[in-house]
C-alpha cells in the first residue's frame, strides 16, 4: 500500500483484500494541512449518507484536517474524497456571519434581535389571523438529531402545523416508505457488515462507488479477496459498480417495476422460494405470485429494452444466492413508481428468505447523511419515534410526553410532504416558509416555478444557512448558521449507526448553531405546555438528546442505551440500543418481523399506485399477526415519455466529487477543480447517429426549461441523456438563476411530479430534445474521467487528477488482524 | 335486453364517463401535480373496464361500442363538464372535482357489486371473473379520492 496518493485521481485508494466472514481490514486515511495538531475532535461525515467516522484536527482554533477512525465499525479508518477535502468549506470567505434582512428589495446586514423579532412578529400575526396552517418548515438532511427533534416539537406542538418536512423527501422518502409498506415500520433491516458476508450483491439504481465511496471500498476489497461476491447492477449508466458486475442491466428509465416484476416472476417460476420463511414471516404471497404471473422476461424485455436472456441471468444470480444483499438508491427512489419498485426489492429478499442473517439483507439507502434522523425525529413528514398518526394511542403518547392536549398535535391527516408544502406556498395558503440548511432554488424540480414562488410577495421566507445560496439570496430574512465542526450533536447513518459529532472550533462571526436558533425562536414565541411551563425545556444539545431518548423509549429507534460518553468512547453504535441491547443492534428482523403488528406499526400502508391510505380495519384484517407484507404492484407507463418533439429520455444524478447543490463542495478547491462545471452525457451510438461529439456545446430542453453545457460521450445507454444534479448559480453572474449563458441547473428541466406513495419528486423521468449550439473547440466536457462520466474513448479527455494538493495519507493497520 | 345486460350497459357507459371525468379533471387541475398524474393513471383502469365489459357483452350478443361514436362522446363530455363544474355553494375547485369523482366511482362500485351478485346467483363464471377483476380497481379509485379529500380539505378549507 502506498503511503500517499492523489485521492482525486484515485478516489477509492488502495486495496486491503479480505475473505468472507473476516473483519474488514483497517486502512487509515488522513489529510492534514500545515504542521502540528493541537487536538483531535470526534466527528463523522456530513457529505454523504455513509456516516464515516473521523477525527477533526484543530490547530490554533482552526480546522486543519481530518483522519479516519480506525476503530469505527462503518469505515475502519477510510475516508472518501469529499470527507478528506470538504472540511475546507467551513473556511470559505463568503460564509454568512451576520443576520440579513430584506429592506427595499435588498438584503441588508442586521442583528439577531431585529431578524428574530421580524420572524416572531410574522409568526404570531399569521397564527392569529390564519392559524397554524399558514406556517411551514422545510429543513435539511444535514442538521443533527437534537436539532430535528427540537424543530419537530416546535412545529408539531408549538406552532401546531402539519407542514414540516426535510429535503430528505428528495433523497430518502422512498426508502422510508418502502420499509414501512413491507415491514410496517421504518428502520434499516441490514447492516454495512453484511458486505463482509454476502455471496451476492445486487445494486438497484445505486451508484455506490460515487454516492458512498467508502462502502464501495468495502465491496472492492471483497472483490479483491478470495471468494468474492457476484454483483448484479441495474443502472442505465456505465458506473464503476456496473463495470465490476457479472450482470449489468441498463433499462430504459421509468421501467423498474416491470424489470423487478420479471425477476420475481422468474423466482416464482423456478420455485426458488423459501416457502418455510414465506409461510412463517409474510402475508400476501398468493397475491404477489398472481400479480407477477404474466410478467415474463420477454414481456419485461420489450418494456425495459434489455435482453430477456439478461433478465433471466439476473434472476438466476438472485435465485442461486445463498447470502444475498440488495441495496437500493435514487435510480429507484427518484424514478417512476418509486415505492412500488423499492417494495419489490424487499419482496425479492423475503421470497428468498434472505433477511436478518449475516450477509442477508436489504439496504434501502439514504442520500443525505442525517436523513435517518429526520425520519426518526419526525422532521420529515412522520411523527417522532416512528409513531403512527392514525393510531390514537401513539398520538396520546406524544401528547403525554410533551404535556400538551392531543388536539394540539395535528394528526387529522398525514404530515404534509415537501412538494405539497411548496404547492400551498404557491397557492398562498402557506404564508411563512422557514427553510433551514437546504437550497430549494436549485434542488427542487422545475426551477423557474420555484424561483417565482420564492420571490412572491405573499410568501415570507426565512432561510437559515451557511452561505449566500441561491435560496438565501431570495429570502426575506437570512439567519447565519454554524455547521459541522462548529457545534455538537449526534447523527445517524443509513445502517442505523449513531455517531457523536463534537464542536471543534467557534463558528464565524455571529453565526449560531441551528439548535440555538430554534431554542431562541421557541423562547421568543413563548410556547407553553398545559401546565404553563416552557414547551421546550432543554437549553443545549445534551438536553435535547435526553429529551429525544425519552421520546424514542420503547420504539424501534430506541436511544435509551446511548450517551455522549458511550459514543465518545466506542464510536458508532447502531440503534436500537437500550437495556436489552446495550451494544446496539446489528440487524433488525433476525428473530422475525418485529414492528408490523396493527397496534405497533408506523403506518397501515398505502396503495402502491394511487397512494390512497389503507384503513386500519383493512390492515388489521390483512395482517393481524404483524408479519411482513408482500405487496404486489402493476407496472404503469411513465408519465412523461419520449415524443417527436422530445425524443430522448433525460435523467439526472449525483456524482462523486459534489454534494447536494455544491454549497460546500463548490467551495472546496480539490473537489471544485475535479468537476468544475455542468456537462451533458450521451451514449456513443446516439452521439454518432446525431453527428455529435465530445465537447460540443449543446442545449438540453424539456417542456419546463433548458440547460446549456458541453457534451460528454460515454457508454450510457443510447436514447438517454444524463445531467449532474449539483450545479446552480451562486458562482455565476445570474447568482439565483440563469444568466446570459442560459440555464446551468439540471432542475430547470425536470418535471413537477412525485411518487404518490412516498411523495418523492421524480428527477429521472423527463423527455428532452438536444440541440447543438456550437461545435467543440477542442475543450472536452468538464466531467470527471474517474467515474460513470468517463469518456467512451479514453483519449477524448485528459484524466482527472488532483495534483499535489490532493495527496492524502493511507496506511494499513499497524497490527493487522490474524488470519484464521 | 335482460336486467343483467342493462347493468352491463350502465356500467359500460359510467366507466367511460368516469374515464372522461378523470381526464377532464386532470386537465383542469394540471397544477395539482399529484392529482393530475394519478387521475390520468387511474383513468386507464376505467377505459380498460369499459373494454372488458364490451367484450363480455359481445359474447352475449349485446353490442356496446368500444370506441365511442362522436355523439356519445359529446354527451359524455357534457356530462363530465356538468359533474365537475364547481357549484357556487360548493367547496373550492379541486375538492368539488374530487367529490364528483368519488361519487361517480361509488356508483360504479355499486353496479359492480350488483353484477357480481347476479353472476354468483346465475353461476356465470365469466361475469364473476369480470367483476372480480374490475371492481377492486373501482374501490381503489374511491379510496384514492377519499384520501385526497382527507389530505387537502384541512388546508384548502381553513388556511386560505
Image (cartoon, coloured by chain):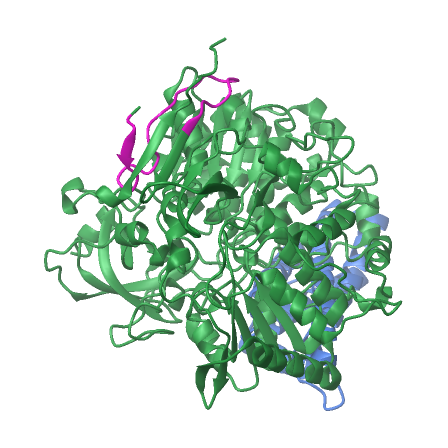
Q: Is residue A263 rendered to the left or right of residue B150?
A: left
Q: Is residue A634 rendered to the left or right of residue A228?
A: right
What secondary structure prevails in the magenta region? Answer: loop
Does the segment drawn in magenta span residue A24?
yes
Does the segment drawn in magenta span residue A125?
no
- Residue A38 appears in the figure: yes
Q: Is residue B28 rendered to the left or right of residue B160?
A: left
Q: Is residue B66 rendered to the left or right of residue A711?
A: right
Kindly indicate the quadrant of the structure image that contains residue B145.
bottom right
Which span of residues is magenta-colored?
A: A2-27
Residue depicted at x 79% and y 53% = B116
User: Where is residue A408 shown, x and y percent of the image?
Assistant: 81, 68
Kindly indicate the quadrant of the structure image that contains residue B83.
bottom right
Q: State the quadrant of the N terminus of chain A.
A: top left
Q: Colour of chain A?
A: green
Along the line of sight, the residue nearer the viewer: A612 or A417: A417
User: Where is residue A17 shown, x and y percent of the image?
Assistant: 39, 20
Kindly indicate the quadrant of the structure image that contains residue A532.
bottom right
Q: Colour of chain B?
A: blue
**Count of marks placed on residues:** 0
Residue at the left extreme of this rendering: A777
Amino acid at each position: 500500500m502506498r503511503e500517499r496518493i492523489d485521492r482525486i485521481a484515485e478516489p477509492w485508494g488502495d486495496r486491503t483484500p479480505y475473505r468472507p466472514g473476516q473483519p474488514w481490514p483497517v486502512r487509515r486515511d488522513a489529510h492534514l494541512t500545515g504542521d502540528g495538531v493541537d487536538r483531535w475532535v470526534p466527528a463523522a461525515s456530513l457529505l454523504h449518507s455513509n456516516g464515516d467516522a473521523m477525527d477533526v484536527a484543530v490547530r490554533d482554533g482552526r480546522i486543519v484536517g481530518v483522519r479516519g477512525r480506525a476503530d469505527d465499525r462503518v469505515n475502519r479508518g477510510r475516508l472518501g474524497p469529499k470527507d478528506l477535502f470538504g472540511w475546507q468549506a467551513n473556511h470559505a470567505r463568503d460564509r454568512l456571519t451576520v443576520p440579513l434582512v430584506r429592506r427595499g428589495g435588498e438584503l441588508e446586514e442586521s442583528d439577531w434581535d431585529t431578524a428574530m423579532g421580524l420572524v416572531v412578529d410574522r409568526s404570531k400575526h399569521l397564527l392569529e389571523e390564519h392559524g397554524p396552517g399558514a406556517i411551514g418548515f422545510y429543513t435539511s438532511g444535514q442538521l443533527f438529531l437534537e436539532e430535528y427533534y427540537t424543530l419537530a416539537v416546535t412545529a408539531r406542538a408549538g406552532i401546531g402545523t402539519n407542514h414540516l418536512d426535510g429535503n430528505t423527501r428528495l433523497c430518502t422518502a422512498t426508502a422510508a416508505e418502502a420499509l414501512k409498506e413491507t415491514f410496517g415500520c421504518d428502520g434499516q433491516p441490514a447492516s454495512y457488515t453484511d458486505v463482509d458476508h454476502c455471496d451476492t450483491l445486487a445494486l438497484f439504481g445505486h451508484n455506490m462507488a460515487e454516492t458512498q465511496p467508502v462502502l464501495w471500498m468495502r465491496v472492492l476489497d471483497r472483490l479483491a479477496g478470495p471468494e468474492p461476491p457476484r454483483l448484479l447492477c441495474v443502472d442505465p449508466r456505465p458506473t464503476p459498480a456496473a463495470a465490476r458486475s457479472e450482470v449489468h442491466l441498463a433499462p430504459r428509465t421509468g421501467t423498474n417495476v416491470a424489470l423487478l416484476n420479471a425477476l420475481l416472476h422468474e423466482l416464482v417460476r423456478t420455485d426458488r422460494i423459501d416457502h418455510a420463511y414465506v409461510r412463517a414471516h409474510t402475508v400476501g404471497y398468493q397475491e404477489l405470485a398472481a400479480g407477477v404471473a404474466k410478467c415474463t422476461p420477454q414481456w419485461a424485455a420489450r418494456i425495459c429494452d434489455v435482453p430477456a436472456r439478461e433478465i433471466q441471468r439476473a434472476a438466476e444470480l438472485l435465485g442461486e444466492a445463498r447470502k444475498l444483499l440488495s441495496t437500493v438508491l435514487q435510480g429507484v427512489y427518484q424514478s417512476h413508481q418509486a415505492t412500488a419498485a423499492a417494495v419489490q426489492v424487499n419482496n425479492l429478499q423475503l421470497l428468498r428468505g434472505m433477511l436478518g442473517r449475516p450477509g442477508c439483507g436489504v439496504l434501502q439507502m439514504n442520500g443525505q447523511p442525517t436523513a435517518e434522523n429526520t425520519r426518526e425525529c419526525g422532521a420529515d413528514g412522520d411523527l417522532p419515534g416512528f409513531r403512527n398518526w392514525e393510531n390514537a394511542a401513539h398520538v396520546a403518547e406524544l401528547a403525554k410526553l410533551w404535556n400538551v392536549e392531543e388536539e394540539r398535535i395535528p394528526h387529522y391527516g398525514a404530515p404534509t410532504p415537501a412538494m405539497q408544502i411548496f404547492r400551498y406556498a404557491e397557492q398562498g395558503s402557506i404564508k411563512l416558509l422557514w427553510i433551514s440548511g437546504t437550497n430549494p432554488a436549485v434542488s427542487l424540480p422545475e426551477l423557474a416555478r420555484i424561483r417565482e414562488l420564492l420571490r412572491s410577495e405573499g410568501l415570507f421566507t426565512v432561510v437559515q444557512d451557511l452561505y449566500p445560496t441561491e435560496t438565501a439570496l431570495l429570502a426575506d430574512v437570512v439567519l447565519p448558521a454554524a455547521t459541522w465542526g462548529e457545534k455538537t450533536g449526534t447523527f445517524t447513518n443509513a445502517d442505523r449507526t449513531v455517531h457523536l459529532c463534537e464542536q471543534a472550533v467557534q463558528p464565524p462571526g455571529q453565526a449560531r448553531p441551528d439548535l440555538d436558533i430554534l431554542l431562541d425562536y421557541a423562547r421568543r414565541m413563548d410556547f407553553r405546555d398545559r401546565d404553563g411551563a416552557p414547551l421546550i425545556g432543554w437549553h443545549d444539545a445534551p438536553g435535547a438528546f435526553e429529551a429525544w431518548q425519552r421520546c424514542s423509549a420503547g420504539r424501534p429507534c430506541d436511544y435509551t442505551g446511548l450517551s455522549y460518553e458511550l459514543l465518545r468512547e466506542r464510536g458508532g453504535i447502531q440503534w436500537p440500543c437500550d437495556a436489552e441491547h446495550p451494544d446496539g443492534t446489528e440487524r433488525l428482523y433476525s428473530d422475525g418481523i418485529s414492528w408490523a403488528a396493527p397496534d405497533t406499526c408506523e403506518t397501515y400502508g398505502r396503495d402502491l399506485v394511487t397512494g390512497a391510505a389503507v384503513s386500519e380495519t383493512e390492515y388489521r384484517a390483512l395482517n393481524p399477526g404483524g408479519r411482513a407484507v408482500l405487496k404486489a404492484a402493476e407496472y404503469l407507463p411513465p408519465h412523461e415519455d419520449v415524443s417527436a418533439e422530445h425524443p430522448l429520455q433525460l435523467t439526472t444524478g449525483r456524482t462523486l466529487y459534489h454534494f447536494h447543490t455544491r454549497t460546500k463542495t463548490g467551495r472546496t478547491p480539490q473537489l471544485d477543480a475535479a468537476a468544475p462545471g455542468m456537462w451533458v452525457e450521451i451514449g456513443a451510438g446516439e452521439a454518432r447517429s446525431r453527428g455529435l461529439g465530445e465537447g460540443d456545446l449543446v442545449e438540453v430542453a424539456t417542456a419546463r426549461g433548458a440547460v446549456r453545457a458541453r457534451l460528454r460521450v460515454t457508454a450510457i445507454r443510447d436514447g438517454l441523456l444524463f445531467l449532474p444534479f449539483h450545479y446552480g448559480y451562486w458562482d455565476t453572474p445570474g447568482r439565483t438563476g440563469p444568466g446570459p449563458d442560459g440555464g446551468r441547473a439540471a432542475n430547470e428541466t425536470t418535471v413537477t411530479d412525485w411518487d404518490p406513495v412516498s411523495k418523492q419528486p421524480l428527477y429521472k423521468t423527463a423527455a428532452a430534445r438536444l440541440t447543438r449550439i456550437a461545435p467543440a473547440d477542442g475543450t472536452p466536457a468538464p466531467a470527471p474521467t474517474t467515474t460513470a462520466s468517463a469518456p467512451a474513448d479514453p483519449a477524448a479527455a485528459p484524466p482527472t487528477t488532483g495534483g499535489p494538493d490532493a495527496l492524502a495519507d493511507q496506511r494499513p493497520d499497524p497490527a493487522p488482524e490474524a488470519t484464521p | 335486453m335482460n336486467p343483467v345486460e342493462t347493468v352491463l350497459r350502465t356500467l359500460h357507459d359510467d366507466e367511460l364517463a368516469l374515464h372522461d371525468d378523470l381526464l377532464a379533471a386532470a386537465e383542469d387541475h394540471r397544477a395539482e401535480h399529484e392529482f393530475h398524474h394519478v387521475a390520468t393513471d387511474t383513468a386507464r383502469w376505467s377505459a380498460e373496464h369499459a373494454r372488458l365489459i364490451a367484450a363480455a357483452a359481445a359474447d352475449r350478443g349485446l353490442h356496446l361500442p368500444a370506441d365511442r361514436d362522436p355523439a356519445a362522446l359529446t354527451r359524455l363530455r357534457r356530462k363530465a363538464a356538468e359533474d365537475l363544474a364547481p357549484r357556487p355553494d360548493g367547496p373550492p375547485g379541486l375538492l368539488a372535482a374530487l367529490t364528483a369523482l368519488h361519487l361517480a366511482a361509488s356508483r360504479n362500485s355499486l353496479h359492480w357489486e350488483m353484477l357480481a351478485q347476479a353472476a354468483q346467483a346465475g353461476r356465470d363464471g365469466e361475469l364473476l371473473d369480470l367483476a372480480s377483476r374490475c371492481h377492486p380497481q373501482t374501490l381503489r379509485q374511491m379510496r384514492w379520492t377519499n384520501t385526497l379529500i382527507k389530505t387537502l380539505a384541512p388546508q384548502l378549507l381553513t388556511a386560505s
